Image (tube, rainbow, N blue to C red):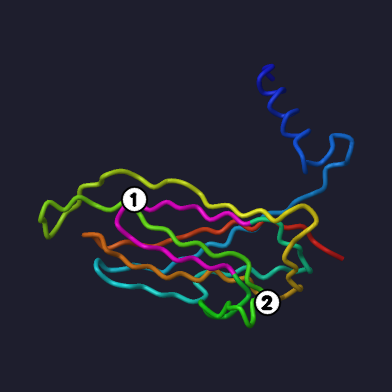
Amino acid sequence: MQARQIAAILALALAPGAARTDEPIKPLSTAVIKATAGTCLKGKTCHRDRAGAWVPKTKVAILAVSVAEDVDVDAYFDVEVSTKPEMYQCNDVDATGCIFRIKYSGPGLFSYGATSGNTYIGSNITSTNLSFPPGYAIIVPAGTPVYVHLDVINESLIDLKVDQDAWIYYTPLP
């Protein structure tokens, strides 16, 4: 391991709020929810409640969520991760089971007046991550489905197959 890598690891370990190096490492589990809205035709809006689901076998504490943004065309995505059976049920009256929500748009296409084909202007390959503060988590009882809901507006010049992964980082609870 290079000296720079060791220094970076030590700086991270000693950062405020980080676990101390003399504390034991605790196991963290990962669930990947594979979600799809299927093929979304050009110019159409595609909504899919329960586009993907994960059902924990034990009670879990969700500590973080990551949703990869990998849109290369002009599409708007609204992604929700929750225990609600349908999208947009999370609100100020009942937010129980609401875990994560993100909206993003791809960079778009140059059309130059074209009615077919595509000319990409770039790529939007990033990830949106949410980690809860130390000591906090969203508790999900055993057997409660965690869903990924998708709402997609395909404003590109091509039909898209819409797939979206959500990574759930959790620890089992007694």
Q: Earlier in the sequence, mark 1 or mark 2?
A: 1
The boundaries of the magenta stretch are 65-81
Drawn side of residue 102 relative to residue 59, left or right: left
Identify the residue under disc 1. Answer: 72
Q: Is residue 40 magenta?
A: no
Q: Is residue 71 magenta?
A: yes
- Tell me which residue sits at (53%, 68%) in the image: 80
User: Residue 23: x percent and y percent?
Assistant: 88, 40
Q: Is residue 114 above or below residue 46?
A: above
Where, quadrant-wise, is the N terminus in this rendering? Answer: top right
Sort mark 2 into few (<14), some (14-19) or many (20+) by Cα contacts within 10 Å: some
Where, quadrant-wise, is the C terminus in this rendering? Answer: bottom right
- Tell me which residue sits at (11%, 56%) in the image: 114
Q: Is residue 21 above or below residue 73?
A: above
Which structural element holds mark 1?
Answer: loop
Kind of residue sitting beneath label 1: Asp
Q: Which mark is residue 96?
A: 2
User: Residue 167: x percent and y percent?
Assistant: 60, 56
Q: Nearer the viewer, residue 32 or 42?
A: 42
Drawn side of residue 71 relative to residue 60, left or right: left
Which corner quadrant of the image does residue 12 belong to? top right
Kind of residue sitting beneath label 2: Thr
Q: Is residue 76 above or below residue 122?
A: below
Which structural element holds mark 2?
Answer: loop
Residue closest to the far bottom: 93
Drawn side of residue 154 relative to residue 111, left or right: right
Give the main secondary structure of the magenta stretch: strand
User: Residue 51: x percent and y percent?
Assistant: 49, 71
User: Residue 33: x percent and y percent?
Assistant: 57, 62
Report the mark closest to the observer, 1 or 2.
2
Please state the total of marks drawn on the protein image. 2
